[in-house]
Amino acid sequence: MTPDLIYGLTGIAVFAIGLVGALCAQDRLRRVLALKLCSVGAGFVLVVAAWRTPPADPDPVPHALVITGIVVMISATAVALALIRRLQTLEAEDDDG
Amino acid sequence: MMMVDPLILTLFLPLFGAIAAFVLPRAAAWVGLLAVLGTGVAVAALARAVLAEGEVVTQLGGWAPPLGIALRADGLSVAMLAMTAGVGLLVSIGALDALRDLRERQYFWPLWLLLLTGMNGVYLGTDIFNLYVMIEVIALAAVGLTVLSGTKQAVRAGLEYMYASILGALLFLMGVGFVYLQAGRLDFAGLIAVEPSGAMSAALALMVVGLLLKTALFPLHFWLPAAHANATAPASALLSGLVVKAALYIFLRLTTYMPLPDEILVTLIGTLGAGAVLWGGVQALRAERLKLLVAWSTVVQIGLIFIAFARAGQVGLSESWKAAALLILAHGVAKSAMFLAAGRIKDEIGHDRIADLDKSDTRPTLAQFTFALAAISIIGLPPSLGFIGKWTLMEGAMAAGYWHWVAVTMIGTLMSVAYFSRVFAGFLRFDRMRGELAEHKGWALADAAPLTLAIAAISLGLMAAPILSFIELGYPFGAQQ
């Protein structure tokens, strides 16, 4: 097994774990975390795509893509967390009233 | 003076408009209207260029693909841009009047302009990573619009929508990663040249599932009805009429550059479409609220578009996309009219329970008339654009001898007549209301926008031939290669 293969398979496995979590988890926060795992897995695969032989000379384009992906996912996580907080406040108000 | 490229304007006018509308909340409505209007003018300029040259390409920053990103417009993309700009402008005019709450008025415009940026980016994009970024932009803006009313139901539906949308985008991203591993480039032109392989099939599968989730094809539609039914009326109109079309458009494009490897997959996609038509029809028949019924009818229409895609199998694919494109345009115009009208009815009557529609003492006649006109196009009665789309679908299916698609379309049409009749009955059977009628509240600006859209949905059917020849400009589906 070459390092890039190990890395790529790990990425696919992490993505799969995240996918199961996103589809099966009940808790709202857990689902957000599962989606984060998916994005990490997809990032792994993109990083592997940068692999060149010799490894000292990688392809920079996938690196740029991964950084963009991370930025997108940070914004998405922020929005999801804000929504979860808002929903919890609304539900707490209902319980009080 | 140097002429600014209309391709660039189409993308950046709404983006800068969104920022300006956010920074200047008091002037948000005017900034928004101006930006949408400006985008419309840019699209018109683009349409002229496409009419003259067939296709228009701009390489951003002067960098050529595969390293740079190119924007490309042809007949199909300009048709989608024009539909988005036209529907968007009318929904914007309606929103001036329909949004009463200060917070809604303030945040609607930046979100909607951001949405417009994302959609224009999708219609002009030629690079699958760029498309991934655009669908995320659309997702974030669309979720914002869903929760605009701030009610508990809306936030809950918005969160579900968020999960589905992000998951769909990440599946797409995973597919993009596979493509890069295999091909080393991400532009459409480069994808054609790649040899089919197991990894490319896996990439295509991931991307297609992600897109189907985002466009809400049965059985991945679970998030749609609640999200579209609980949003405020202008937001519902944008979400149902425009947003689901973006992922659908990427699907149409992607499958021309990375063809589905097997006939069985085409049939499978058509079968899922048939499932959507039947299941969505049953749910629309059972829906208790008007907006929920309209949302389920979107699920049905998405299914119908996928049947149009599959109607003649793999051999007929290069013709089938035209039927699909016509149905996409028809649904965009008619459904936004219908959601705006449903919102008006709900505003005037005070609720949207279908069973109690005829018990109200006010009668929003113009909105009801608009709803009925929009229903004509969605059911697919002549001479509407919806009729032309359905007719093209069935003609192709019959020519290919695929009678099962004709049967499903017929059943779907009958069911849509049935569930819209539930609403019409509520509009018409007024005798159950004893007592004085309330005074007519007069027509509002918010009535004008949906009425214009509904009339357009019907009269565009008369222009179907020029529309069809326009969307073929620039060979969007590779007749030239």
Image (cartoon, coloured by chain):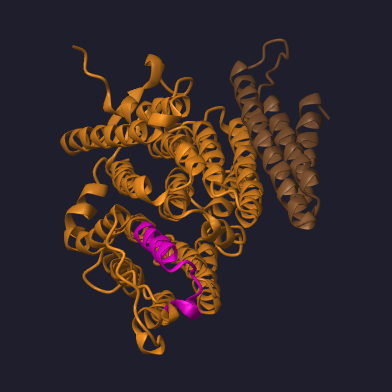
Chain colours: A brown, B orange
Side of B193 where B152 appears, left or right: right
**Which x, y percent locates residue B153?**
63, 57
Name the one closer to the observer, B55 or B435.
B435
Identify the image quadrant of residue B240.
bottom left
Identify the image quadrant of residue A9.
top right
Is residue B386 visible in the rendered structure shown here? yes
Is residue B216 visible in the rendered structure shown here? no
Magenta-colored span: B335-357
**Which x, y percent locates residue B410?**
39, 79
Q: Please tell me whether residue B471 is drawn above or below residue B346 in the rendered image.
A: above
Is B351 contained in the magenta span? yes
**Which x, y percent locates residue B117?**
42, 34
Side of A45 where B233 appears, left or right: left
Determine the residue positioned at 36% across, 89% down.
B431
Name the one closer to the observer, B64 or B445.
B445
Name the one closer to the observer, B133 or B287.
B287
Where, quadrant-wise, is the N terminus of chain B in this rendering?
top left
Q: How many marks?
A: 0
Q: Please tell me whether residue A29 is drawn above or below residue B127 in the rendered image.
A: below
Identify the image quadrant of residue B393.
bottom left
Determine the residue positioned at 78% across, 40% down.
A33
Q: Please tell me whether residue B238 is drawn above or below residue B190 in the rendered image.
A: below
Instruction: Give the dominant element type of the magenta stretch: helix, strand or loop.
Output: helix
Side of B72 where B114 appears, left or right: right
Determine the residue positioned at 54% across, 78% down.
B282
Side of B177 where B455 appears, left or right: left
Name the one closer to the observer, B247 or B157.
B157
Where, quadrant-wise, is the C terminus of chain B in this rendering?
top left
**Which x, y percent locates residue A45?**
70, 32
Is B336 contained in the magenta span? yes
